Image: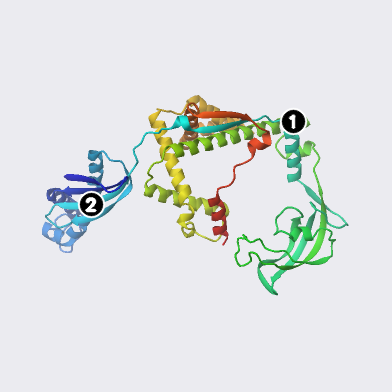
Amino acid sequence: MQVSVESTSALERKMNISVPAERIESEVTKRLQQTAKRAKVSGFRPGKVPMSIIRQRYEADARQEVLGDVIQATFYEAVVAEKVNPVGQPAIEPKVFEKDKDLEYIATFEVFPEFEVQGLEGVEVERQSAEVAEADVDNMLDILRKQNTAFAEVDRAAALEDQVTINFVGSIDGEAFAGGTADNVPLVLGSGRMIPGFEEALVGCKAGETKVINPTFPEDYQNLDLAGKTAEFTVIVNKVEAPELPELNEEFFAMFGNTEGGLDGFRAEVKKNMERELKQAVQGKVKSQVMDGLLAANEIEVPSALISNEVDRLRVQAVQQFGGNVKPEQLPAELFAEQAKRRVALGLIVAQMVKQFEIKADDERVRSTIEEMAAAYQEPEQVIDWYYKNEQQLEDVRAVVLEEQVVDTVLGKAKVTDVTVTYEEAVKPAAAPEVAEEAEEASAE
C-alpha cells in the first residue's frame, strides 16, 4: 500500500492511498467462496454451484462490499502509519475503482490541532468571597414564604400583589389576534407576566367590573406582527384575591422535608443550602474567568467538523429548553456557531491542559464531590452508593473534578485578586448569553 499526505490548510489533510489489485481480488475471491457455501441456485445442491456461476451472479455485489471494507481498513492503517489524528469520518474521492487495477482513492479529513497551552501567567481572575449572614437567611425565608403564597378572596378593589382572575378579549385596529383572548386567567398584579401597562391598568378594579385598556406591545416583542402596536383589551374581573403569606410553623417546614428542630433547625438547613449555592456560584464565576483567559491566551484553529457536531447539540438543547413547534435542524446554524466554536476550543484546550500538566482526577476529591451532591437528599448514603455502582455517572463526576483541577492549575499561575462581596452579589448570575435569547425567540415563532 502506498500513502502520501498533503496539507491543504492548517487542519485539512488530503491523503492519497493506493491499494494493490492483488489485495482486492483476494478479498473478492474469499467473499465469493463464502457465498458459494450458502448460495441457492436452481439445479445445484447447496455448496456445489460452479464458481463461474457464483461470479456471474454475485461478483458485482461482492466487489462493492470489498471495496467499502478495504477503504475503511486501509484508511485506518494509513492514519496509524502516518501518525495523523483525524477528526470524524473522511470524505472519500475515488480515483481508480476498476477490476484488476490498483485501488486508488483520496481521503480528505481534518486533524486535531497540535499546540501547547501557554499564557497562564497572564490570566486575570477576580475571586469573590462572601458569607451567609443572618439577614441573608431572613431574606431567603421571606422569598420561600412568597413562593408559597396562598390567596383569599376579598371584597375590595385590587391592589398590586393581589391576584385577579380575568377574562379578556384583545384586538388591534378592530381585528382580533392570535393569543389575545382567554377566560379565567389568574394574574398576580405586578408580576410582569403581561405586556407593560396591562397589569397596572387593573389596579383599583373590583370583582364584576369590566374595563377597556390600551397597552402597547414592546418594540422587541417576539411576535413581530404585534411588536410596537397598541392593542385594545376588554377585561372582565371575575375575582380579586389578597395574598396570605404562610406562617413559619411546622406545617411550612414540612413542605421542605424538615420535620425536626423547629424554626432554628429550619434556618440551619436553609443556611446550609445557601452556603452550598454560594460556593457553586463563586466557583462558577472563577471558572468562567479562567476559561475566558485560556481562550484569549490560546487562539487555536478549531476543526469545522467538531463545530458542526456541537451546533447540532446546541440546537437540540435549545428546543428542549425553550420548546416551540420547531425541529432542531430548523434553527439557523449561525445562531449557535460562535458558542459552538467557543465550547469546542475550550474542550481542546482543557484536554491539552490535562495531557500537558499530567492531571488526573483526585479520588478523594471525587468522593467529596459525590458526598456534597448527596447531602441534598434525605438518604445521602444511598445516593453515594448509587454513584459508585454506576460507572457512567461516576465517570461524569470524575470529568467535573478533572475540570476543577484544570482550573486550580491555572489559578496557581494566574493573577488572582481576592475581593469580599455580599451574599447577594456573589450569587447573582452572569448575564444570559445572547444566543439563548435568540434561540428562545426562534423556537417561539
From the image, tell me which residue sits under label 2.
Answer: 106
Nearest the viewer among 417 and 403 is: 417
> Taking 213 as reference, is 384 above or below it?
above
- Label 2: how many residues lie within 10 Å, few (<14), some (14-19) or many (20+)? many
Which residue is pictured at 53% across the width and 38% down the height?
288
> Taking 63 as reference, is 168 above or below it?
below
Residue sitting farthest toward the top: 364
Whether residue 69 appears in this view of the structure is no
Q: Earlier in the sequence, mark 2 or mark 1?
A: 2
Quarter holding the N terminus is top left
Amino acid type, residue under disc 1 in the picture? Glu
From the image, tell me which residue sits under label 1.
Answer: 134
* Secondary structure state at the residue bearing disc 1: helix
User: Quick check: 275 left or right of 304?
Assistant: right
- Tell me the distance, in whole angstroms, between the alpha carbons under discs 2 and 1: 69 Å
Amino acid type, residue under disc 2 in the picture? Ile
Quarter holding the C terminus is bottom right
Rendered location of residue 87, percent (x, y): 34, 45
Quarter where residue 131 is shown = top right
* Secondary structure state at the residue bearing disc 2: strand
Residue sitting farthest toward the front: 122
